[in-house]
Image (cartoon, rainbow, N blue to C red):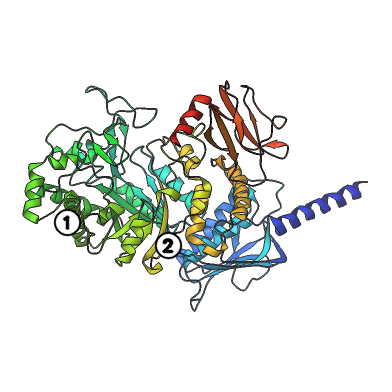
Amino acid sequence: MKSLSLLFASFWMLAKVFAQTSTDIAIIPQPVSLEKTNARFSLNNQTKVTADAKNADVQRVVRFFADQVHLATGFTLAAAPAAVKANTIGFKLNKTADQTLGKEGYLINVTPTSVQVTANDAAGLFYGVQTLLQLLPKEIESHSVAKKTAWVIPGVKITDYPRFAWRGLMFDVVRHFFTKEQVKEYIDEMVKYKYNLLHLHLTDDQGWRVEIKSLPKLTEVGAWRVDKTGTFGTFTPPAENEPRTYGGFYTQDDIKELIKYAADRFVNILPEVDVPGHSMAAVAAYPELSCTPGTYRVASGEKFMQWTDTGFYALVDNTLCPANDKVYEVLDKVFTEIAQLFPFEYIHMGGDECAKNFWEKSDAIKQLMQRENLKDLHEVQSYFVKKVEKIIESKGKKLIGWDEILEGGLAPNAAVMSWRGSKGGAEAAKMQHDVVMSPNNNVYIDLMQGDGAIEPPVYKTVRLKDSYKFEPVPEGADPKYIKGGQANLWTEQIYNMRHVQYMTWPRAFAVAECVWSPAEKKNWNDFIRRVEAHFERFNVAEIKYAPSMYDAIINVSRDGDQLKLELSTEVEGLDIYYSFDNSFPDRFYPKYSQPVKIPVDVQNVRVITYRGKDPIGRMITIPIAELKKRADKKK
């Protein structure tokens, strides 16, 4: 009987391993080429690693892999000479570069006796490691030894390389401050999906986050504000005597540490100093930089901008003054120190959402326009941008800015980050300027990703499917001017790292695939299969993610005196159940199959999604008054 039990146990383990090797390969972003084989490699405590012991970059990659394996398995992957072939995982640089792979591409070949990762450069080996870890069971993400796991790598031959060189995530550390260690945590998460650029938004109305030694007030004053919690943008203005205790900044040593940490993971850091708008923190530190005399304080989340259907204007002047020579003297000091700190070739100058209504009233601006023959305020901003470009270029760097820098005339050598859709990027590429695509309709991951009834409130929604539709090359643009793309995480409504994770994943999975994988490889249903596998990995890693893709999509319109409810889902194969009677629907309630009229006296509508017999989406409750508002907006 004991022998029979052992036989069944062995059969179960083999079945589990076979199932993994045949169906569970779920790599994000999708490789250029993946061929499955019948082989499989079993990782164990006797497995050795082969690599060039004299190449420091290669050894760093090997340690990265070995440390994660040791953490999750307990195995110590000892080094072995290249001549050892059995039970080895090898990391090898090509002696003659494979032109197909470029700097970041790699090959993986898994056989029963060995795994070989090959690349032209250590960066390629690093991305090969990310794929190799994804080929291992989800328990490889564990922070402690995961027992009773079959550490099997399925047989594959992979050829992979990125579609774009610029694969970025923007992290706003101003609206809410995130520590040096938290930024490192974000880097650790992003590199798993082959992102290679971290755009740090370092200055804004709500804080100045980088030490500038020649201008100490930028952090002594500009890094601190009144601590408020709630819905950012709706807070009451702080009283004069309220303590300004919330905030912080990165010392120059902190920045150097972050840059090295990122570089060790083949990530560049792009610094952004947002000017001439979004400059309240700078003006609070040095009020003479404003066109409008007054007393200024770092914004604490109170409203000071008015947004309308046709544009916006400032209630308090939050801009630097383009007509003030001292502004350029200050910016010269700022960009001197920024350029010395950050080795990346670009510096981001912002340039977005600059309210010009106070400039209209400024005598200094009027005199500037007359003196420089500037026809309108867009040309005033263009004058400012061109001056900033000269400053940045004098430091040996290139300027990049949000697409507003196109207005009034683009600076001669500027690169454009296109956020207001694709139009600005297409226009800049037509002018033969480099472009990074970041359209808000696809890659603004601070926006809601599901129904506003259960998502943290923001003004707009970008669903996972919207992110997966991201195409970095605008229609009609010459691809050679498109450097790549990135997703942006603004943090007005994001107070902590768990919420950072919730907003980033899974939409950053989608963006990663859009900037790495061949466009023709994209497949929504297969992507969802892989996302679900990575949700399981995130559960093991204890990283938070949004389950919004499972929730019902709720649309409502008016049909005479009644409301008509239309329900759908992003993910195929889900059933939707609903109630109108204030009770909580499950799969024994009415199942949605076609648009349904809501009875006149209903107070609340509740919906939930199921996959088979199991609830998968969240219960959504929407008061009828809210549905009426939504229906009226469509009129």
Task: Tell me residue 564's x, y (percent).
Answer: 57, 33
Q: Position of residue 208 (x, y in %)?
A: 27, 41
Q: Which residue is mark 2?
A: 473
Q: Is residue 549 above or below residue 104?
A: above
**Residue 529: x and y, percent?**
63, 51
Q: Is residue 551 visible?
A: no
The answer to whether 190 is drawn above or below residue 625 in the figure is below
The one of 572 and 38 positioned closer to us in this rendering: 572
The tag on residue 387 is 1
The numbered mark at residue 457 is none
Q: Nearer the viewer, residue 290 or 466?
A: 466
Mark toward the viewer: 2 or 1:
2
The quarter of the picture where the C terminus appears is top left
State which quadrant residue 131 falls in: bottom right
Left or right side of 377 for 19: right
Which residue is at a point 40% across and 35% down the rendered structure image? 493
Task: Give, as a three-letter code, the residue at label 2.
Answer: Val
Sooner in the amino-acid sequence: mark 2 or mark 1: 1
Give the residue type at disc 1: Lys
Quadrant of residue 230 within the rendered picture: top left
Q: Residues within 10 Å of mark 2 (few under 14, many from 20)?
A: many
Label 1 secondary element: helix
The residue depicted at 38 percent of the width and 65 percent of the height is: 477
Q: Secondary structure at mark 2?
A: loop
Measure how far apart labels 2 and 1 are at the Cα level: 30 Å
**Which residue is the extreme one toward the bottom?**
96
Q: Position of residue 419 (x, y in %)?
A: 36, 51
